[in-house]
Image (cartoon, helix red, strand yellow):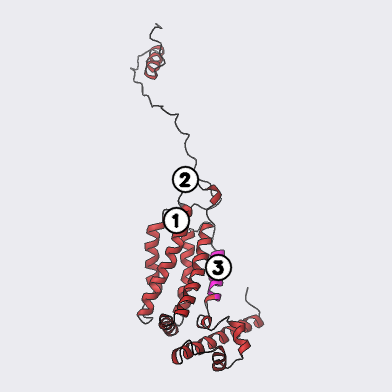
Amino acid sequence: MSQPRSTARTTAQRHRVRQELSTAAMHLFSTKGYEATTVDEIAATAGVARRTFFRHFRSKEEAIFPDHDDTLVRVQAVLDSAGPDEHPLEVVCRGITEVLRMYAESPEVSVARYKLTREVPALREHEIASVARYDRLFTRYLLGHFDESQHRVGDDDPLLAEVAASAVVAAHNHVLRRWLRAGGKGDVEAQLAHAFDVIRETFGTGMGVGRGRSKPAQPPAEPRGSEVVVAVARTNTSPAEVLRAVEKALGTHDPLAG
């Protein structure tokens, strides 16, 4: 269902204002320095009032990351729309690809922002906090496929869920950093797809038992100390002789009985 025109117009206007504030913040941070730049200056450069700035961002460092909130919503939508038969790790890989596309939409801006975050510790810390939100989201999703109350010794699925979530985020960050250091050149989605292949080889066959899915029935355990006995007899052996041979093999034959 398409959005009403008024809603679509409001969304577009919100996006435009956020991008203009972000551009103004990055310009001022680069020319004046992060510490010397004020929120009032960012708002004035973007041509909006101070109160407008705070309708969109909580702080000046948040202004250079205008898309994380919207991207988090898109990622959540990917997880929510996953089919019941999809491997949860595949869904997570598809979800974090949305994050990569956010950066790839504007390579020049992403590269400039990357350089800025390397120079300003406060911006770097904010970026780390933003990435941690994706990590928590994916971990919750993967753990949601494993019922902790049903956990048994030797069942490593919950452990693999947490480790795999962190691995997906780490792979994304590794590919993204390499792409940014290269000036935003190259097919970054293809590079991420290769990283996912590595993750699948490591985790893909070790997890995936969904919540609510019944595990295959196991054959009943043999009684302790039991053995398999094979008796061999000629085709012309009488049934009574066959029975005595089996009883003797099983140790149930009474040697005193005829």
Label 3 SS: helix
The percent position of residue 5, horizontal first and vertical second, equals 65, 82
Decide: marks 1, 2 in contact (CB < 8 A)? no
Residue 45 visible in image: yes
* x 44%, y 60%: residue: 164
Label 2 SS: loop
Q: Residue 160 shows which numbered tag? A: 1
Provide the residue span drawn in magenta: 69-80
Report the Cα–Cα distance between label 1 and label 2: 14 Å
* x 46%, y 55%: residue: 159
Report which quarter residue 10 is drawn in.
Answer: bottom right
Report the Cα–Cα distance between label 3 and label 1: 21 Å
Which residue is label 2 attached to? 153
Which residue is label 3 attached to? 76
Q: Residues within 10 Å of mark 1 (few under 14, many from 20)?
A: some
Residue 187 visible in image: no
Front disc: 3 or 1: 1
Amino acid beneath label 3: Gln
Q: Residue 73 shows which numbered tag? A: none
Report the Cα–Cα distance between label 2 and label 3: 32 Å
The percent position of residue 237, horizontal first and vertical second, equals 36, 14
Amino acid beneath label 1: Leu
Which corner quadrant holds the C terminus?
top left
Decide: marks 2, 3 in contact (CB < 8 A)? no
Amino acid beneath label 2: Val
Q: How many marks?
A: 3
Q: Does the magenta portion include 71? A: yes
Mark sitting earlier along the chain (1/2): 2
Q: Residues within 10 Å of mark 3 (few under 14, many from 20)?
A: some
Of the pair 162 and 168, the residue shown nearer to us? 162
Decide: marks 3, 1 in contact (CB < 8 A)? no
